[in-house]
Amino acid sequence: MILKIKKYSGFYFYEHRVLGKIDEKLVPIPFNFKSIELLFESEKAELIKSELKKEFPAEEKVSILDLIHHKNKIVKELGEYVYEKVFANYTAKQWEIPIEEIDTSVINRVPVLLGYDDRYFQDEYQFMPKEGFTKLFENILNHENITLELNQEASLILNVDTENKKILYNGEEFNGNVIFTGAIDQILNYQYGPLPYRSLKLQFEDYEANYYQPVSVVNYPNEEDYTRITEFKYLSNQNKEGFTTILKEYPRAYDYKNEEHTPYYVISSDENQALYNQYYNAVKDINNFYLCGRLAEYKYYNMDAAIKRAMEILETIK
């Protein structure tokens, strides 16, 4: 995968780090031994680390749920602390649904790391495109066999005929392959009802300073209305003196009828998955129609996983 992408962009080494504001202190997220040392008195911190090493001698990380349900009192208390301080309020803000209704896969996205590795991801290869993702995709699309149409509503030119199992393009049957990355409920005219998402209100702010915060992302799980602040100079490897831009993210409900709303996050639940399955079953037997990405597959993807998924579909088509 790396070699295939490199022909469209150079890359620079980048390891993502996230801090969280917990009890007025900025500590590494995911929670690790450094987080424990910053938030607990020395003696208590040493005891917690010792118990974690004893109970999980061969593990590099452990889920919050495993900690909460552990028989060891010290381990269980840590799990409850992390759950309350790092996860519960953040989740309530992000999803605006009762914590007990949150899918366990969402809870397990943020484990506790058993060591001092403060990177948000532990992948072997971690890089960012030198000129950004926009330029990377422009390079991919700059191919003689690709015609690009912008500001075009897909549903006005593309019709998915689920009854006759075929695709119509500008009213004519289209026998070529179609890889659809848009919202599956929208292209099927919401015939089973809209799929639920969470949206965001994005607030950019400029500052006359070299940096606003010590890392690219700081999470705010508790007191603030926003969930996190991103500072892009860290992500884009820029070195502009005396100026920086940040982004505050305010979660909000998604209304598919509101053009100002963007569907950012899938809301994972059995009920929502069942609704998606209705849409999927309606198109799965159309042999030249492929679904790819967050909106089309109603699934959470990071960028690396999205690229991998696109390549998997390409191999299927071949």
Image (spheres, helix red, strand yellow):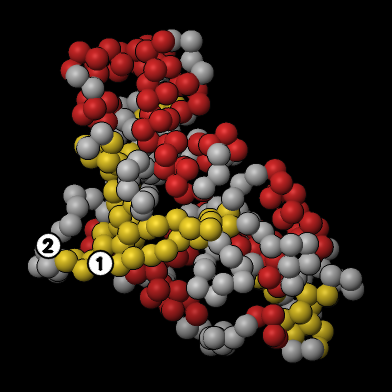
Q: Is residue 116 above or below residue 236?
A: above
Q: Residue at x 26, y 62 (%)?
A: 246
Q: Residue at x 25, y 34 (%)?
A: 23
Q: Is residue 292 above or below residue 98?
A: below
Q: Quadrant of residue 132?
A: bottom left
Q: Quadrant of residue 76?
A: top left
Badge nearest the viewer, 1 or 2: 1
Secondary element type, mark 2: loop
Q: Position of residue 172 (x, y in %)?
A: 80, 88
Q: Residue at x 45, y 56 (%)?
A: 251
Q: Position of residue 228 (x, y in %)?
A: 34, 52
Query: Which residue is the site of mark 1?
Result: 205
Q: Quadrant of residue 249?
A: bottom left
What's under tag 2, amino acid-wise?
A: Asn
Q: Position of residue 274 (x, y in %)?
A: 75, 49
Left or right of 245? Residue 156 is right
Q: Residues within 10 Å of mark 1 (few under 14, many from 20)?
A: few
Q: CA distance from mark 1 to mark 2?
A: 14 Å
Q: Residues within 10 Å of mark 2 (few under 14, many from 20)?
A: some
Whichever of labels 1 and 2 marks the residue nearer the N terminus, that label is 1
Q: Nearer the viewer, residue 229 or 258?
A: 258
Secondary element type, mark 1: strand
Q: Position of residue 160 (x, y in %)?
A: 78, 75
- Which numbered tag is attached to residue 130? none
- Is there any visible trace of residue 5 in the rendered image? yes
Query: Which residue is the site of mark 2?
Result: 210
